[in-house]
Amino acid sequence: MRIGELADATGITTKTLRFYEASGLLPPAGRYGNGYRDYDDEAVARLDFIRRGRAAGFTLAQIRDILAVRDAGNAPCGHVRELLAQRLDAIDAQLADLHALRCTVAQLHQSAADAEPDTCPPEQVCRYL
């Protein structure tokens, strides 16, 4: 299939498809005599994997590494499991940071509940921050 057909089949722009090919995520396509790219059905499955990897929060570099393991003829399951564990740790840290931020903002919001703008000193932008 040509690049436009692959874009339609996967919902990925042709610009992104070219980028994926240039960055090694998508193997170079065969070419028609007129120079148009000719992708096979395997490209659709590979792009679906890339989409699922991005949805899990993996970087393109991590996805490229996983694909390289598979392309070498090995199952990348152990590597993927390790990456998923790292991702879970990162998400837990983000959640902790967000919880702390929420507590701070809630305290600020509470202190501003009975705002009295007329009593705010002019040298302060806002006493609640």
Image: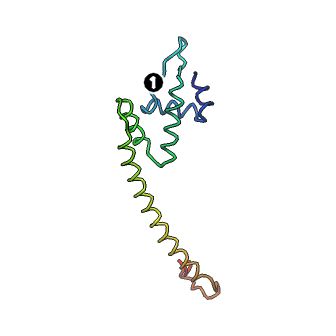
State whether residue 114 is above or below residue 38.
below
Write the residue at 50% across / 75% down: 104
Is 50 rendered above or below residue 56?
above
Residue displayed at 50% across by 27% down: 42
Residue reaching furthest to the bottom: 119
Q: Residues within 10 Å of mark 1 (few under 14, many from 20)?
A: some
Residue at x 51% of width, y 30% of height: 18
At mark 1, the secondary structure is: loop
Q: Which residue is mark 1?
A: 28
Counting labels gives: 1
* Residue at x-position 51% and y-position 34%: 47
Residue type beneath disc 1 = Pro
Tell me the quadrant of the picture where the N terminus can be found.
top right
Indicate how the structure is coloured in the image.
rainbow
The foreground one among 54 and 81 is: 81
Q: 80 or 26, which is in the foreground?
A: 80
24 sits left or right of 47 in the view: left
**Residue 26 appears at what percent x and percent y?**
46, 30
Left or right of residue 111: residue 58: left
The image position of residue 114, as x and y in percent, is: 63, 86
Q: Position of residue 8 (x, y in %)?
A: 63, 30
> Which x, y percent locates residue 24?
42, 31
